[in-house]
Image (tube, rainbow, N blue to C red):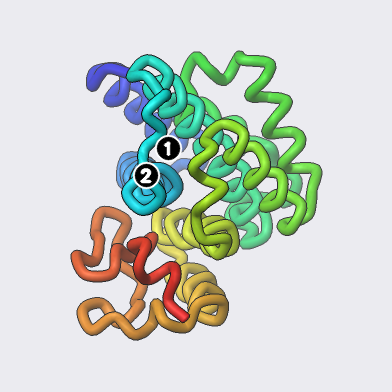
Amino acid sequence: MSQLDRIKRRSDAATEFNQRHNRQDGAQIVNSLADGLNALRDLLYTRVHGDVEQRVGVDSLLVAAAEIKQLEMGRNEIELYEIAESATMVAERRYFPKDDPWYLDWLIRLRLGEAEKNPAASKRLSEYLSQSPDGRRRKFSQILESSLPDAGHAPLVIYRLFPLAVWVATALAFGDHAGAEDARRRQVAILPGIGDCPSCHGCVLANEERCPQCGNPFWNYEWLIDD
């Protein structure tokens, strides 16, 4: 997607948000949400692909074209899972009227653009949204590992931390700091070591920020394997 397409997609989403909810902060929300989800998508891809390759070795049979295809498939799968988790979080926190499907449809347009019309994407989202949190995690891990075989060697804790990371990013975009802090506490309960970073101390950071030491909002490989 070109920079112009990205800008237009965000602008259209902000305009729609403001018009529907009679607000003026649509651009701020859209940019924070998009930046947060983009960062998490790219960080997770690095954790399950780049980091694993460095530790277990690169498949010499994987030609450049195949690796590019893997990158696209992996990023797309992460994107769909993020949409499902963000929509679930917004519904649970009741940012909008109960049972209003608007946010999901709006987020799909923001994140997928023309790909929203892809039947496979719609099917995957329906599968995620029909399941429990544990069911979504299991489904996502299976799909990601089929798209990116390296993911099978990544620390399993990523699948428990990542959906909560999406919840943090979504809450921050909507100014729900209590929701973000609650999701972070749940992450620390899963992996207490992430609260020990001498730089950020495991605190919630703004969506455009990242801790240079531990990787917060999604932690470096060494922190994920911390016992």
For this rendering, which residue is in front, 156 or 113? 156
Q: Quadrant of the N terminus?
A: top left
Residue 167 image offset from top left, x and y in percent:
52, 59
Residue with the mark numbered 2? 57
For this rendering, which residue is in front, 168 or 133? 133
Element class at badge 2: loop
For this rendering, which residue is in front, 50 or 195? 50
Residue with the mark numbered 1? 18
Residue under the image location 25 percent in, 61 percent down? 210
Drawn side of residue 58 relative to residue 7, left or right: right
Amino acid type of the residue tagged 2 in the rendering: Gly
Image height of 55 relative to 124, above or below: below
Does residue 191 appear in this view? Answer: yes
Residue 100 image offset from top left, x and y in percent:
70, 42
Amino acid type of the residue tagged 1 in the rendering: Asn
For this rendering, which residue is in front, 48 or 190? 48
Drawn side of residue 119 relative to residue 49, left or right: right
Residue 68 image offset from top left, x and y in percent:
37, 21
Q: Are there few (<14), some (14-19), or many (20+) residues within 10 Å of tag 2?
A: few
Q: Nearer the viewer, mark 1 or mark 2?
A: 2
Residue under the image location 63 percent in, 24 percent down? 121
Give me the C-alpha separation between circle 1 and circle 2: 49 Å
Does residue 107 appear in this view? Answer: no
Image height of 19 relative to 223, above or below: above
> Mark 2 or mark 1, which is nearer the start of the sequence?
1
